[in-house]
Image: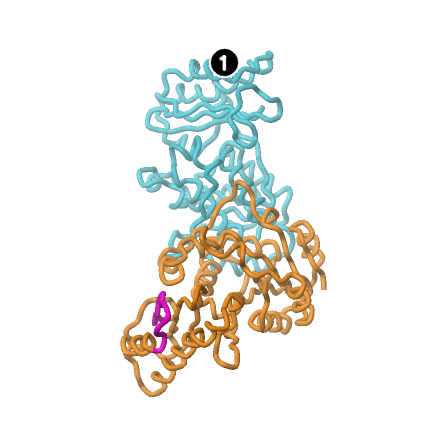
Chain colours: A cyan, B orange
Amino acid sequence: MKVIKSVDELREYVAGLNGSIGLVPTMGALHEGHMSLIKRAVSESKNVIVSIFVNPTQFLPDEDLHKYPRKEEADIKICELCGASAVFMPSADDMYFENEPCVIAPPKFASILEGKTRPGHFDGVLRVLTKLFNLTKANRAYFGKKDAQQLLIVKNMVKTMFLNIEIIACEIIRESDGLALSSRNAYLKEIDKCNALRLSRSLFNASNMIKNGETDAAKIKESMLNTLEPLEVDYVAIVDREFNEISNIKLTDTIILVAAKVGNTRLIDNIWI
Amino acid sequence: MKVIKSVDELREYVAGLNGSIGLVPTMGALHEGHMSLIKRAVSESKNVIVSIFVNPTQFLPDEDLHKYPRKEEADIKICELCGASAVFMPSADDMYFENEPCVIAPPKFASILEGKTRPGHFDGVLRVLTKLFNLTKANRAYFGKKDAQQLLIVKNMVKTMFLNIEIIACEIIRESDGLALSSRNAYLKEIDKCNALRLSRSLFNASNMIKNGETDAAKIKESMLNTLEPLEVDYVAIVDREFNEISNIKLTDTIILVAAKVGNTRLIDNIWI
């Protein structure tokens, strides 16, 4: 496996590739969620590039850019074990220029939920992905459903800007106790861990209510909020696949999302119905 | 030559191509300036696609979107005569979606000169070009130096967003009397034509002053403004190739630009020193 640390080196590497290219864009601190993406990519594409880049433009000024977990050596090892062909770990100076265009995500999708709490976040995501898609010339890129809103916005960009790449959505990977894997789980103190489970538990409860015939979104939300107590809830949302809020559950066209603070750590989770 | 009127049809066409692809993006009403771009593209690329699309997002609300000259049949004939492989003439509904990202050109380059008078213009240019570059999978795209600031901003996007396309800058084509060719020249009334020559004349004068040893940008500007009288001048600018204003002429690194209204028609012109 090749470890690539500059844009020029990546370009040279990509120019020499034959066959399909899969990209797994990450911010490092890799866990089994990322591993499932890499393995899926390896099973579908001849060449798999994992990018590891803590992208500054998707962090708000007061967010955790500088303390975001960085585990370079372990990450390289994980990529190798999963069968990646190359890891791309550029510096911010190599990826960004003093004067360059920026990409603004469509407000309908980017101003709600995550975008409401993190204005500008999705603009930074789209900007760096545009760069990564162009640099790697990937035929496919792999994203986890955990960042459901990101997935929607990336798919929208691919469709509307006519990008020549296929976006593959991969299932959320969870701890055996239900907690959705996230690099930010590393921030959780021992005392938070039990409370962190309230997110997934609220979603599983919602799923069970629906299985038992409940279709009223308001009732489901109310029950979820009870499960989430005493967490500081940012949002509980029940939307269709286009992220329109819905008041009645539509089977195969519903996503239920939750964001809440556990201690000082903001966590998100969701479930697709 | 193939005439392609939809995005789907273009995708199918491009998927079937072998060899290099050259793109000449235009808004139609083709003249000898466009013809020189197409011919250059034909000489360098196996396949040449000319896009003809009066792009709504690059017009300001009070600009001439609806009266911009449209000459579909003549344009197709011209592309065929110049040896293009295909003409792509999509509808706005086919190119744009209700919800999609937008691209914001870097303020350093896009807020001055043309961008000052036409705020948002270059954002629309970059948005449509991103779409056209992706759809055509072009290896090269051809632009006239007449839109010098556009050329700078497009080259900046290609460099900073790592687009896999080469931008080819082509010389300005002029009438025998010096007037730079422009689709908007069609708006000029007979009485305006003599005054329209003041733009190119002011640039030729500037060029002569420099040939005769003048290096003081202020003196050159003053002389140009005299030549431009009595036109309503929007700007006269002397910049380096990065569009920084300069006070002393640097040979091989200077562009002199002018924008002025002739009757009701706003014209631009420039000369590269």
Q: Is residue A180 above or below residue A124?
A: above
Please report, as a chain letter, where disc 1 is located.
Answer: A
Q: Toward which corner of the image does residue B164 lie, by quadrant?
A: bottom right
* Residue positioned most to the bottom: B212
Neighbor class of circle 1 (other Cα within 10 Å; few <14, some 14-19, many 20+) is some
Q: Toward which corner of the image does residue B229 lie, by quadrant?
A: bottom left
Q: Is residue B39 above or below residue A248?
A: below
* Residue positioned most to the top: A212
* Residue at the spot of label 1: A219
* Residue at 49% from the left image edge and 60% from the top image edge: B158
Q: Which contiguous range is marked in magenta?
A: B227-240
- Nearer the observer, A250 or B193: B193
* Residue at 41% from the left image edge and 22% from the top image edge: A196
* Residue at 37% from the left image edge and 41% from the top image edge: A59
**Relative image position of residue B92 (x, y in whole percent):** 58, 49
Q: Is residue B50 above or below residue A243?
A: below
Is B236 part of what is drawn in magenta? yes
- Nearer the observer, B32 or B42: B32
Q: Amino acid at mark 1?
A: Lys
Q: Give the total number of marks visible in the rendering.
A: 1
**Relative image position of residue B218 (x, y in whole percent):** 27, 75
* Quadrant into which the C terminus of chain A falls: top right
**Relative image position of residue A99 (x, y in whole percent):** 38, 57
Is A150 part of what is drawn in magenta? no
Label 1 SS: helix
**Relative image position of residue A36 (x, y in whole percent):** 56, 36
- Nearer the observer, B177 or B21: B177
Relative to residue B42, is residue B146 drawn left or right?
A: left
